[in-house]
Image (cartoon, helix red, strand yellow):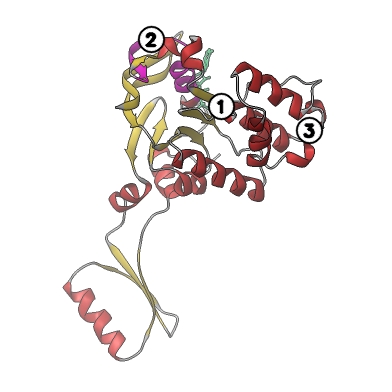
Amino acid sequence: MAVIQVEQVRKTFGARDALTEVSFSIPKGEIFGFLGPSGAGKTTLIKILTAQLKPTGGVAKVFDQPAEAMQQSAQKMRFGILTDNSGLYERLSIEENLELYRKLYDLPRSAVEQVLQFVNLSSERKKKTNTLSKGMRQRVMLACAIIHEPELLFLDEPTSALDPVNSAHIYKGLRYLNEKGTTIFITTHDMAEAELLCNRVAILYQGRIQTIGSPRELKRQHRENLIRVELTSGEAYELPVDGDTADRIADWMKRGLIERVETKEPSLGDIFIKMTGSELL
Ligand SMILES: Nc1ncnc2c1ncn2[C@@H]1O[C@H](COP(=O)(O)OP(=O)(O)OP(=O)(O)O)[C@@H](O)[C@H]1O
């Protein structure tokens, strides 16, 4: 069963198309990356999937039910969400914020301790949230989103405010959650993050999906059919993949002249730029 199914979803704001006929489905257990430059429509889709917005057209289903049902309390238990506007109680400490969520979801006391470790904030637990750095806030909001170990997790740029050490810690935690069965829908501008975490990615541009597939498939599809050969002399050649090239390489090898041979594979960032014409943001 698909956890998320989106068919021909459109969303217009006045005369502006934010999403144009977006279709895809996400099976249980997948980490799916929704990539796109600023304004591409990523947050709009998350809002549709979590019943904060209605689509103008098409069908959006989550857990095999229309996405509008996602604000019902039975469904709220099943997913977690981290976005820019995820709120915290400013005058409460990190621990007190988490305690509220623990009670809301009727979880054992150990859930707070566990999630504090997950986001690397055990020793900061007594700090008031209005005194936290941006990265710490982000981690507390993430903790609130996952304390109930949801079946489905929406993450809108979860590591945008984090340093690499904390990002790596979060990736490890997300993989752990995913191994335990959580399906993850993540938006990011960070192509290395997408490549590291996601089973599949979709690249969205101006409200349309430009391409969709695993990072490896996309790289293969966009691979230039060239082999780059670097010789010990420092000379470098980009050669077509054919018999003549094989003969030349064999000859260079026999004579011990080869420093390096590589296929020209694009990075996910290269593919993103090709699809969107944008620089990474
Ligand atoms: N409530 C709204 N009213 C009018 N226009 C909106 C509204 N919400 C979003 N838009 C427009 O829809 C488009 C898509 O916005 P959205 O926030 O989904 O982009 P995004 O891909 O999430 O961008 P970012 O990466 O900057 O968060 C943008 O042009 C935005 O200005």
Determine whether label 2 and label 3 are within 8 Å by CB.
no
Residue 99 picture location, percent across and down? 70, 23
Q: Which residues are drawn in magenta?
A: 43-63
Query: What residue lies at 49% left-to-right and 33% top-to-bottom?
Result: 187
Find residue 109 and report its image quarter.
top right
Query: Which is more N-terminal, label 3 or label 1?
Result: 3
Residue for badge 3 = 132
Q: Nearer the viewer, residue 116 or 16?
A: 116
Quadrant of image for the C terminus: top right
Find residue 101 and report its image quarter.
top right
Disc marking residue 148: 1
Q: Nearer the viewer, residue 103 or 17?
A: 103
Residue 238 in view, yes or no = yes
Query: Which is more N-terminal, label 2 or label 1?
Result: 2
Query: What residue lies at 41% left-to-right and 31% top-to-bottom?
Result: 205
Disc 1 or disc 2, which is closer to the eye?
A: 1
Q: Amino acid at mark 1?
A: His
Label 1 crowd (10 A; few <14 / some 14-19 / many >=20):
many
Q: Nearer the viewer, residue 18 or 48?
A: 48
Q: Amino acid at mark 3?
A: Leu
Residue for badge 2 = 56
**Residue 221 vertical placement versus 67 (above, below):** below
Query: Which is more N-terminal, label 3 or label 2?
Result: 2
Q: Nearer the viewer, residue 250 or 173?
A: 173
Instruction: Measure the C-alpha gap from mark 1 to mark 3.
Output: 23 Å
Residue 11 picture location, percent across and down? 41, 14
Helix, strand or loop for disc 2: loop
Instruction: Measure the C-alpha gap from mark 2 to mark 3.
Output: 39 Å
Quadrant of image for the N terminus: top left
